[in-house]
Image (cartoon, rainbow, N blue to C red):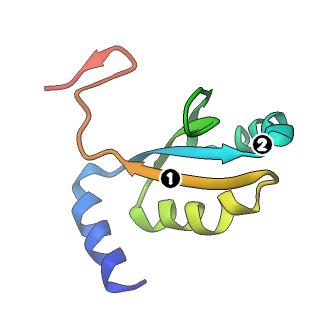
């Protein structure tokens, strides 16, 4: 684990869960295969087929930044059809699944 990983883990430590949104550009012939494979990951909460720059948006939750990083670097690229990803880490949640947070 490098210094950046330690800093990120410390930053997210009090949250207990690290949430991120991941945009995935997928080869159009592989979209259904990608969705079929990615839905088996327990850390993937939501999968959306979307319009725009990305084809798929994922909402993921991990116990640590290190585990999120491992998923992004090692697991996601191995899935057939992945061309590009962009990860947006959630810093604060104001409303989720209809529940408002103070």
Q: Which mark is residue 36?
A: none
Q: Residue at x 62, y 55 (%)?
A: 84
User: Disc 1 marks which residue?
Assistant: 86
CA separation in Å, label 1 and label 2:
16 Å
Q: Residue furthest front?
A: 53
Q: Secondary structure at mark 1?
A: strand
- The spot of residue 32 in percent (x, y) is 82, 33
In the rendered image, which quarter is residue 90 located in?
top left
Question: From this viewpoint, which residue is outermost toward the top?
Answer: 98
What is the x, y in percent for residue 93? 26, 34
Relative height, residue 63 to residue 99 (above, below):
below
Q: Is residue 9 above or below residue 33?
A: below
Whether residue 98 sits left or right of residue 21 in the image: it is: left
Q: Which mark is residue 34?
A: 2
Q: Secondary structure at mark 2?
A: helix
Residue situated in front as seen by the camera: 13 or 81:
81
- Percent coordinates x, y for residue 1 in the rendering: 43, 83
**Closer to us: 63 or 87:** 87
């Amino acid at each position: 684990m490098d210094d950046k990983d330690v800093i990120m883990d410390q930053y997210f430590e009090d949250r207990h869960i690290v949430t991120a949104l991941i945009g995935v550009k997928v080869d159009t012939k592989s979209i259904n295969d990608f969705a079929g494979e990615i839905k088996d990951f327990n850390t993937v909460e939501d999968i959306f087929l979307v319009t725009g720059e990305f084809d798929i948006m994922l909402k993921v939750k991990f116990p640590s930044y290190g585990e999120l990083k491992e998923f992004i670097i090692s697991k996601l690229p191995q899935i057939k059809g992945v061309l590009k990803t962009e990860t947006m880490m959630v810093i604060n949640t104001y409303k989720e699944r209809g529940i408002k947070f103070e």
